[in-house]
Amino acid sequence: MWAEISLKGGSAVRFVDSHVHLSHYDGPESVAGFARLTDTLLSAVSIDRNTSIETLSMVKRWPHEVLGFVGVHPSEAGRSPGLEWLPAALEESHGLGEVGLDPGYGPGSPVATQDVVFQRQLALVEGSGKPIQVHSRGAVRRSLDAVESFTLGPVLFHWFEGEELLSEVMDRGIFVSLGPALLRSRKLERIARACDRGLLLTETDGPVTYRQLGGAQGPCLVPSVVFRLAEVLGEGFEETRQMVAENAARYLGPKKG
């Protein structure tokens, strides 16, 4: 299946940034250029209608390097209750994301509203088999309950920190992605060690910057995440890189177009 998710010229994918906000970059062409040069596949996520449109346009611009996910982020649920645009966007997309729940967003996007928007989006993608990217910060239990209520394709809980519920997440076959914070976080090291290795993915959440890494950000950090993951798991770099690539193949499925 992995050969079906290939880059320009049919070269093998070496690295995967399973969660990056390409539409938030002032110069996304430099990120796409890096991906092309390093055989990195970018799973570009969206947060609302406008960024979903931008993401889909980037897929057309860089079809071999970018997979496009569309949807409404929990921070935008209070401002984007209307989803009449989403079914058509989903038809063009590779998957749904970034969607989910986060009580930290407060009055501007109350959890009750987030929950309604989240479940409406899951209902729209139900039965399609398309992969889904879930934001579950501070709401892993509620997010688990929501995805369990639908018949869905592969699910990813990105930037996963719900250590206490990891076994349930693994039992349900949900993928989790770890980013550059793994280089400094003992908690994420514990999560990585306890994970089913077949459900681990790498991400950067770019253009989020990492102060502990000198403000670095973006897909250029994926090899460092793989290197640290290999150390944590007690495996070689190449074995870990291949493991993540194979996991990504199962999560993402064959690329269309």
Image (cartoon, rainbow, N blue to C red):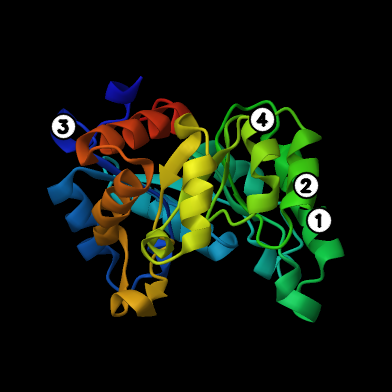
Query: Residue at 59% across / 27% down in the picture?
Result: 129
Q: CA distance from mark 4 to mark 3?
A: 34 Å
Q: Which residue is mark 4?
A: 171
Disc 1 marks a residue whose amino acid type is Asp
Q: Which residue is mark 1?
A: 115
Disc 3 marks a residue whose amino acid type is Ser
Disc nearer the start of the sequence (3/2): 3
Query: Residue at 21% across / 64% down in the picture?
Result: 30
Disc nearer the start of the sequence (3/1): 3
Quick one: 64 or 168, which is closer to the camera? 168
Q: Which mark's residue is nearer the viewer, 2 or 1?
A: 1
Disc 4 crowd rating (10 Å Cα; few below 14, some 14-19, many 20+) is few
Where is 239 relative to 233, above or below? above
Image quarter in which the N terminus is found: top left
Image quarter in which the C terminus is found: top left
Q: Quadrant of residue 124?
A: top right
> Element type at marker 2?
helix
Cβ atoms at labels 3 and 2 below 8 Å apart: no
Q: Which residue is mark 2?
A: 120
Disc 2 marks a residue whose amino acid type is Arg
x then y, percent, for residue 92: 50, 40
Disc 4 marks a residue whose amino acid type is Asp
> Element type at marker 3?
loop
Q: CA distance from mark 4 to mark 2?
A: 25 Å
Q: CA distance from mark 3 to mark 2?
A: 38 Å
x then y, percent, for residue 70: 55, 50
> Element type at marker 4?
helix
